[in-house]
Amino acid sequence: MKNEIKNIGNDLKFVKNIYLKLLAILPSFNITDSKILPYGLKAHTRSISWLVEQVITQQTKYNAKKLGLDDANFDFPDTPLHDCEIIHRGKSYFVNVKIHNIEGRENKNDISAVEKLYFQYSVNKKYTLIYACFGIKFENIKISFVKDYLEIFSPQFLPIYVNPRNDKIQATYRHDKIYRTREEFLKMLKEKSKSIILK
């Protein structure tokens, strides 16, 4: 039990160090030009989140050697829980990138569909997911990365609240960790969810 939790903690630290290095490289960028969007975009994170996530995952691959990685992959279908695979010394780290507009409040956000998470964690015992939440500033058409906002966390250590309307785990990106084993995590998901039907 202690080893499992310690290993996840080490993975979280490793991924955090990689993304801290990436934050030093990531440039600010314009989504388009002011002729196309003369009044800019509304400051809704959802309007730009997929694009910003692509910038992060593609820049991770592009700068893999500079970051000390063997490689990074981002070309996945929409079905997996992760959208980036970081490879270091033959080991894969599966990362789901999220975006937080630092000028907004720290509200509870949808983290993952419970059924999907439960299925992945029970079928593949070696699979562990890491969430990486980057802070951004969003001004008109310009996106800037906030260097001192980076939250790295495991779904296994989340304070689990399941939204009954959509059966998704919700949490703030900044939260206190609750250390639990995979077995304890799966048990908790079963207890909190209505969509997991045991066969």
Image (tube, grey):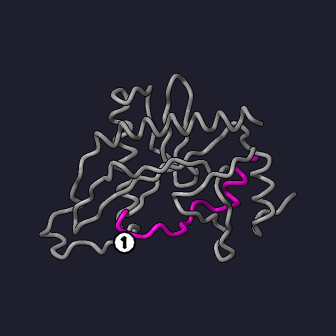
In the image, residue 47 sits, relative to residue 130, either above or below, namely below
- Classify residue 36 as left or right of residue 195: left
Residue type at tag 1: His
Q: Residue furthest front?
A: 176
User: Does 106 lie within the magenta span?
Assistant: yes
- Classify residue 13 as left or right of residue 99: right
Q: Residue at x 35, y 55 (%)?
A: 52
Q: Position of residue 34 (x, y in %)?
A: 14, 68
Q: Position of residue 129 (x, y in %)?
A: 60, 45
Q: Residue at x 33, y 35 (%)?
A: 62
Quarter occupied by the C terminus:
bottom right
Q: Residue at x 28, y 64 (%)?
A: 138
In the image, residue 170 sits, relative to residue 68, either above or below, namely below
* Quadrant of residue 69 within the rendered picture: top left
Q: Position of residue 140 (x, y in %)?
A: 22, 69
- Which of the pair 123/111 is nearer the observer? 111
Find numbered disc 1 in the image and state the secondary structure of the residue it sits on. loop
- Classify residue 180 as left or right of residue 175: right
The crowding category of the residue bearing disc 1, from other C-alpha atoms within 10 Å (few below 14, some 14 to 19, many at least 20), is: few
Quarter occupied by the N terminus:
top right
Q: Residue furthest right?
A: 199
- Which of the pair 160/49 is nearer the observer? 160
Q: Position of residue 80 (x, y in %)?
A: 58, 50
Q: Residue at x 48, y 50 (%)?
A: 151
Q: What residue did someone put label 1 on?
A: 44
Report the magenta residues as a range: 102-122
- How many numbered marks appear? 1
* Quadrant of residue 141 within the rendered picture: bottom left
